[in-house]
Amino acid sequence: MANYDRAMFIILGGNWTNIGDQLDAGVMQATSNAGAGFKAVAGKVITTYTSLATNENNLWYIHLDISELDVDGGYAFIQLYVTVSAEDSVYLAALCQRESRVFEPVPRTNVTEVIN
């Protein structure tokens, strides 16, 4: 996440093979790009989702701010994990968008308000 302040994972779920199949997803953090020392990012999970229909389409978002990572512990890498209850039970696509702040925070405003 070097040079980035936020990330957003987008997971697209298509048709399910069976009603009742399940999906779990979440964000892991690691100390290297190979995944060394990985651990979950607290609160950044999709708890078990159970399909209600075979023609169901889903869209999930997981937002992450750099402040939610254990950067003091050397965690600077992220990855998304997705687990489904049965192999080939749903069509999935995942995308990660990262964002860096363009402007430095301003400690105070320099705008003068005039009221008549």
Image (tube, rainbow, N blue to C red):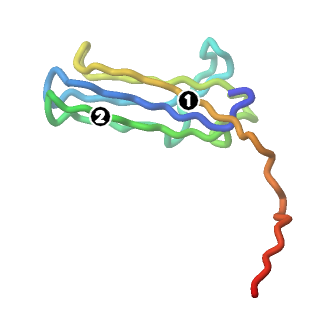
**Is residue 20 left or right of 93 when viewed as pictured?**
left
Kind of residue at disc 2: Asn
Q: Earlier in the sequence, mark 2 or mark 1?
A: 2
Q: Does residue 11 lie above or below 91 as drawn?
A: below
- Mark 1 highlights which residue? 97
Q: Quadrant of the C terminus?
A: bottom right
Residue farthest toward the front in the current orientation of the protein:
116
Count the marks. Answer: 2
Q: Secondary structure at mark 1?
A: strand
Q: Specify the quadrant of the image occupied by residue 100.
A: top right
Where is residue 50? Give x, y as percent.
23, 35
Q: Position of residue 91 (x, y in %)?
A: 28, 19
**In terms of depth relative to the viewer, which is nearer, 110 or 97?**
110
Asked if residue 67 lies left or right of residue 93, the reply is right
Horizontal and vertical percent for residue 6? Answer: 63, 37
Whether label 2 touches label 1, CB < 8 Å? no
Query: Dot 2, how many residues are within 10 Å of its Cα: few (below 14), some (14-19), or many (20+)?
Result: few
Q: Residue at x 20, y 32 (%)?
A: 56
- In what element is the residue under mark 2? strand
Q: Is residue 7 left or right of residue 108?
A: left
Residue at mark 2: 58
Left or right position of 84 against 61:
left
Distance from Cα at disc 2 to Cα at disc 1: 18 Å
Which residue shows up at 53% across the image and 31% down it?
40
